[in-house]
Image (spheres, grey):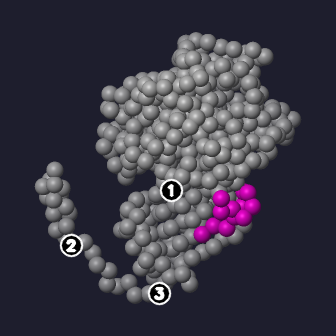
Amino acid sequence: MAYDDLRSFLDALDKENQLLRITEEVMPEPDVAAAANAASRLGEAAPALYFDNVAGFDNARIAMNVHGSWANHALALDLPKTTGTKEQVAEFINRWAKFPVEPEWRDNPLWAQNSVEGEDINIFDILPLVRLNDGDGGFYIDKAGIVSKDPDDPENSGKQNVGIYRIEVKGPRKLAIQPGPVHDIGLHLRKAEERGEDLPIAITLGNDPVISIVASTPMEYDQNEYEMAGALRGAPAPIAKAPLTGLPVPWGSEVVIEGVIEGRKREVEGPFGEFTGHYSGGRNMPVIRIDKISYRTDPIFEHLYLGMPWTEIDYLMAPNTCVPLYQQLKKDFPEVQAVNAMYTHGLVIIVSTEKRYGGFAKAVGMRVLTTPHGLGYAATVIVVDEDVDPFNLPQVMWALSTKMNPSDDLIVVPHLSLMELAPQSDNPGTGAKLIIDATTPAKPDNRGNYGNQVRDLPEMGEWLTKLQQLAK
């Protein structure tokens, strides 16, 4: 079934024993974040967490680790919770083929039950804000879908954006946001500032599980996230019009915050414990003025713990980083077999491919660096043969151990764009990138001695099935 809101998905997780309700009183710091940090250490079937007894808050409801395991991620896509990683990526590719599916406009959105405007706004009255890591510079909203439009082409629904970006709470109605130049919202803001305008935005919290997935998917600039959500859900995504900005927002959100990114206004934002497993430091970032908040009665605040991988964000961004890269590469190079971009949101990307001729694998690696995602994120690309499974790290390490010659197969490209949060960047926003060719050389490249590779025995597949049945 397709989930229209967060609460129905939490109920489904509960029925599948994938939700832990923490009923004892907990401290907002460090208990909530520490529990989510611990949950990520429980393995690939870790549950979501739900807190409703938080000291110091009258009626706080906080959900953590909602996407924080392969089991929960599978359930978000209406798959059996035992569905494996490769199978989830393959199903993601199958559903992507149904894109676009037009969203469905609905009346009476769930978030319209309550509202507050202007000087009456105090975000602390609505959200039970807690810090995630000891070194964070303040309270953050880090799992919200932020909706914006291209100021130069606002009627083009393809150029609207729904993305997840970190937001620091700076005051009762003031926020700070980090819109990287590689992201669509960064382009929207630049265009607005060139026009001398503010950028209207809507910040949607507590969304249905597929909205969170597509909001963290590196789609092409003119691809609509709601249309992708419909393809993944197998049903049109329900949306409604935000009352102040008119922006399309999810119908089932818990909270909708409307306002503007104020043009050419910057304040220090950060530090923040990021998905890289490092603190990102403080930088001057754009400021958001909140003009209206609409929210469900007793809203659930969905928070996202980030730290040293793997945490929830790594599950949230794993298949949906692999699939668009696969689609973009496959279009140019039909020989590409699979793409694994799960590691630290694709700072490392592993591609398996057939080769047409000598040097072909290196060309595939260069293409990775020029994809919309690769431009800002891909720091290291490993290319392996078509018979090497990029999701099987022992096989990848075997290819690195036996196929890669450091004198010829390491290609360093200096001074490329690299996201500001990457700890290895020379300067924030730039750095060297590495392509590792761990494939068997193809003619006319005759380096090495690869003529006697051991292959699986023909009967292996039959015996694998037999042994799996015997082991049940």
Q: Is residue 366 above or below residue 197?
A: below
Q: What residue is drawn where x is 41% and y is 43%?
A: 69
Membership of 429 in magenta stretch: yes
Mark 3, secondary structure of its residue: loop
Find out whether the residues at labels 3 and 2 contact each other: C-beta distance under 8 Å: no
Image quadrant where residue 219 sits: top right
Q: Residue at x 63, y 44 (%)?
A: 134
What secondary structure is found at the residue carrying circle 1?
Answer: strand
Amino acid type indicated by mark 3: Arg
Name the side, left or right, on which 291 lies relative to 94.
right
Depth check: give the residue in front, 450 or 74.
Answer: 74
Q: CA distance from mark 3 to mark 2?
A: 27 Å
- The answer to which of marks 1 and 2 sits earlier in the sequence is 1
The image quadrant that residue 427 belongs to is: bottom right
Residue occupied by mark 3: 447
145 part of magenta stretch: no
Q: Which residue is mark 2?
A: 457
Tell me what residue is drawn at x 42 percent, y 68 percent: 396
The residue carrying mark 1 is 343
Q: What span is in magenta?
A: 423-434
